[in-house]
Amino acid sequence: MNLLINALKAQIADLARAKGVARPRVLDKVNARGEVVIALILPRETSETSETSEAARPEVRPSREEIKRARER
């Protein structure tokens, strides 16, 4: 069973690389019901987007001090 899982993980990683994913991670685990779960983890940036796009950047929230100053105005 381990050989089958490892072969499947390798094929998934190869397919992700062929589709342009720079560093795909493929992990497996056994859940509470005894089923094998395989996960494909994609990095934030792929080879297609070398720079972080505006949509991928986390939202910058104002600090408490900035909110307090805005309320006082």
Image (spheres, helix red, strand yellow):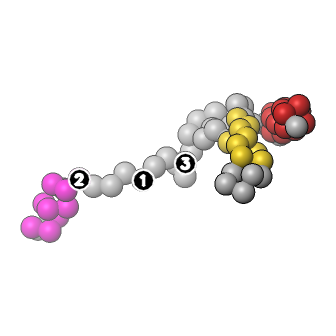
The quarter of the image holding the C terminus is: bottom left
Range covered by the magenta-colored residues: 63-72
Marks 3/2 in contact by CB < 8 Å: the verdict is no
Mark 3 or mark 2: whose residue is earlier in sequence: 3
- SS at circle 3: loop
Check residue 59 in the rendering and tell me which mark sits there, or answer none.
Answer: 1
How far is disc 1 from disc 3 in space, using C-alphas?
Answer: 9 Å
Look at 71% across and 46% down and name the residue there. Answer: 30
Give how far across and how far down residue 59 sits, in percent. 42, 53
Marks 1/3 in contact by CB < 8 Å: the verdict is no
Label 3 neighbour load within 10 Å: few <14, some 14-19, many 20+: few
The answer to whether residue 54 shows anywhere in this view is yes
Q: Which residue is mark 2?
A: 63
Give how far across and how far down residue 9 sits, in percent. 82, 36
Check residue 56 in the rendering and tell me which mark sits there, or answer none.
Answer: 3
The quarter of the image holding the N terminus is: top right
Picture layout, residue 28 above or below residue 31: above
